[in-house]
């Protein structure tokens, strides 16, 4: 329909432009216009025509009598045809012929008129009918011309309104609307487009190849869109291009052909919409989505009625929930019953009043029922108008923290216990040393040496978090301060000892080394110590046994002591008590021998 109106408007404009420019008689134009404006009914037209003919007949009869009887009727017939139309003009022709014939009739003639008069009357009738018909056609032509003029004026008005509307639309549109020729060169850009593209002078870019404004992938897409438009197809793409001022923007571009009357493309229409803000919002949303999905925390959203509608993979894994079942759960389902009551009665109301809540709670595993300690943080989610539309949560798995807290408490308890044991050992060593010493200086030296040995054993335990101590490491550290550890020949499997036994064994080993350095094999350059141990396995059900021998070789001749000192008592009694076995010192003349025989199961273990 729109195309037909445009064609009609074009025809009217063409006719208006190319119609002959001739002068008209204003009086006649006014009469014709009045006859068209005030149209008479058909009976009234005949009355007017009759009256006009009779007036002419009377005028001829009383004023003009000597000329042809038909001549004065011609103007009247012409006027009737111009003013009243075809049928009244024919009627006026017949009436005028009859009236004229009557005015010249002779009763003496057989047919009232002579033959010549009859011929003249018929000729007049024919000519007057022709004149009347011609006048009537002129009347119709004037009517058509006036109608075309009105249509022309209406078409021009509508065309002007349409042009004004389109100009207003183009000027107010925030899209960049461009027309390209078939070589993809710019021929037009809308006023709104020039603003958004920051074009100060379109003439500076008119005729430039449009695809050259695009870079990278956008240039390829633009060239493909132009090729499609030339082939009569529409297409669209998204690309980035800078404005004339250098501002980078993202655009959604629609490209379509502009068709001529024959349907073939005569140009290309390109409409570019600035989607920079939308693109940035999408990228920001995408970044946030990636953060949520890649987070190891439980991140979820729920509506005001508690229905959960979003939960990341980490959250699903934490509670063992399938994504297909997500829409069927509510906030309370994530907690055991007693926890769910607290959340409903305390946590969610606090969120509505204060905007957020954070604290430790227990989740439940949907498949196993395991209680999962979590740091539960929940907050309000608001719409753009400030209305709360739901709840959000970022919840952290607190199991490792709980384990660390329990481990810390265990270590504190263990440390307290160990410290008490160490202090008890120190107290015992100090008391026995002072009791056996003859003077304060000797007591100070002996006590310092024994405390050093105790510290060395403690260092070994500290390095192993007080869990166990390697026998080789205990021997190496304890004997190092004595300066002859290279003369201790050790042989035995890798064994770890329990913490309390380690302290006692370290002190005993220190006493053996001190005695060997003062009186035994280490008091001479040729002496050495063979320190060996092994583990033997009995029958099924029996614990393996640990046997250790300290044997001094190539030292001075040994004589048994006349009294039992602190060192001997500590070595035999302490190790016997701690190892729950036998501990014995022998004093053959060839060198001191210490033997320890005890079950290993309660005291340590062999390293694999």
Image (tube, helix red, strand yellow):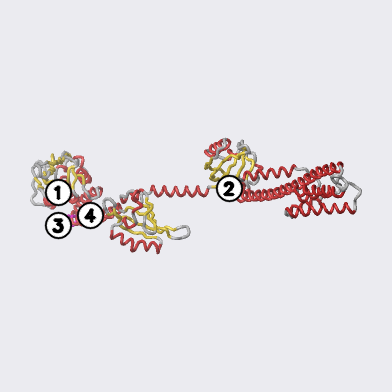
Query: Secondary structure under badge 4?
Result: helix
- Tag on residue 414? 4
Looking at marks 2 and 1 on the same chain, the residue that comes earlier in the sequence is marked by: 2
Q: Quadrant of the C terminus?
A: top left
Secondary structure mostly seen in the magenta stretch:
helix
Query: Secondary structure under badge 2?
Result: loop
Looking at marks 4 and 1 on the same chain, the residue that comes earlier in the sequence is marked by: 4
The alpha-carbon separation of the residues under discs 4 and 2 comes to 75 Å
- Tag on residue 435? 3
Residues marked 3 and 2 touching at CB (< 8 Å): no
- Horizontal and vertical percent for residue 243? 58, 45
User: Crowding near pointer 3: few (<14 within 10 Å), some, many (20+)?
Assistant: few
Residue 426 lies in the magenta-colored region: yes
The alpha-carbon separation of the residues under discs 3 and 2 comes to 103 Å
> Who is closer to the viewer here, 52 or 296?
52
- Horizontal and vertical percent for residue 125? 81, 44
Looking at marks 3 and 4 on the same chain, the residue that comes earlier in the sequence is marked by: 4
- Horizontal and vertical percent for residue 464? 24, 48
> Who is closer to the viewer here, 26 or 337?
26
**Residue ID for mark 2:** 175
The alpha-carbon separation of the residues under discs 1 and 3 comes to 33 Å
**Residue ID for mark 1:** 602
Q: Quadrant of the N terminus?
A: top right
Looking at marks 3 and 2 on the same chain, the residue that comes earlier in the sequence is marked by: 2
- Can residue 257 be seen? yes
Residues marked 2 and 1 touching at CB (< 8 Å): no
Residue 117 lies in the magenta-colored region: no
The structure residue drawn at horizontal position 53% and vertical position 44%, both measured from the top left corner, is 252
């Amino acid at each position: 329909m729109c195309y037909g109106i445009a064609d009609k408007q074009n025809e009217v404009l063409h006719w208006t432009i190319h119609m002959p420019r001739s002068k008209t008689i204003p009086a006649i134009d006014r009469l014709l216009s009045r006859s068209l404006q005030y149209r008479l009914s058909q009976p009234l037209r005949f009355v007017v025509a009759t009256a006009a003919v009779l007036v002419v007949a009377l005028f001829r009869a009383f004023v003009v009598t000597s000329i042809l009887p038909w001549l004065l009727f011609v103007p009247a017939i012409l006027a009737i045809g111009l003013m009243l139309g075809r049928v009244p003009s024919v009627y006026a022709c017949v009436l005028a012929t009859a009236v004229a014939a009557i005015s010249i009739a002779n009763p003496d003639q057989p047919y009232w008129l002579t033959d010549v008069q009859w011929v003249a009357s018929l000729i007049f009738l024919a000519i007057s009918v022709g004149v009347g018909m011609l006048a009537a056609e002129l009347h119709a032509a004037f009517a058509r011309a006036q109608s075309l003029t009105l249509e022309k004026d209406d078409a021009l008005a509508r065309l002007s309104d349409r042009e004004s509307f389109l100009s207003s639309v183009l000027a107010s549109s925030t899209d960049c609307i461009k027309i390209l020729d078939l070589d993809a060169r710019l021929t037009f850009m809308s006023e709104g487009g020039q603003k958004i593209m920051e074009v100060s002078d379109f003439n500076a870019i008119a005729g430039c190849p449009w695809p050259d404004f695009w870079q990278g992938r956008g240039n390829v897409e633009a060239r493909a869109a132009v090729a499609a438009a030339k082939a009569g197809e529409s297409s669209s793409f998204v690309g980035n291009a800078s404005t004339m001022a250098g501002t980078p923007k993202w655009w959604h571009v629609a490209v379509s052909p502009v068709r001529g009357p024959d349907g073939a493309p005569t140009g290309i229409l390109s409409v570019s919409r600035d989607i920079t803000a939308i693109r940035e919002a999408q990228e920001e949303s995408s970044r946030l989505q990636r953060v949520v999905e890649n987070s190891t925390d439980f991140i979820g959203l729920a509506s005001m009625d508690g229905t959960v509608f979003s939960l990341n993979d980490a959250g699903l894994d934490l509670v063992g929930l399938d994504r297909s079942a997500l829409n069927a759960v509510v906030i309370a389902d994530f907690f055991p019953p007693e926890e769910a009551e607290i959340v409903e009665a305390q946590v969610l109301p606090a969120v509505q009043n204060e905007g957020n809540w954070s604290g430790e709670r227990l989740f439940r595993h949907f498949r196993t029922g395991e209680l999962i300690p979590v740091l539960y943080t929940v907050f309000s989610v608001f719409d753009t108008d400030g209305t709360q539309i739901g709840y959000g949560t970022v919840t952290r798995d607190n199991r490792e923290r709980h384990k660390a807290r329990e481990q810390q408490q265990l270590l504190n308890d263990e440390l307290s216990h160990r410290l008490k044991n160490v202090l008890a050992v120190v107290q015992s060593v100090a008391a026995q040393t002072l009791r056996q010493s003859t003077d304060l200086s000797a007591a100070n030296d002996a006590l310092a040496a024994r405390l050093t040995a105790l510290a060395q054993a403690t260092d070994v335990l500290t390095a192993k978090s007080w869990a166990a101590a390697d026998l080789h490491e205990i021997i190496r550290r304890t004997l190092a301060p004595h300066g002859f550890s290279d003369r201790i020949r050790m042989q035995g499997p890798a064994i770890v000892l329990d913490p309390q036994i380690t302290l006692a064994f370290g002190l005993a080993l220190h006493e053996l080394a001190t005695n060997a350095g003062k009186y035994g094999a280490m008091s001479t350059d040729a002496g050495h110590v063979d320190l060996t141990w092994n583990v033997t396995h009995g029958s099924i059900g029996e614990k393996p046994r640990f046997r250790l021998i300290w044997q001094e070789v190539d030292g001075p001749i040994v004589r048994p002591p006349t009294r039992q000192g602190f060192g001997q008592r500590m070595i035999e009694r302490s190790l016997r008590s701690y190892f729950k076995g036998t501990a014995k010192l022998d004093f053959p003349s060839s060198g001191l021998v210490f033997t320890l025989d005890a079950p290993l199961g309660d005291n340590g273990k062999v390293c694999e």
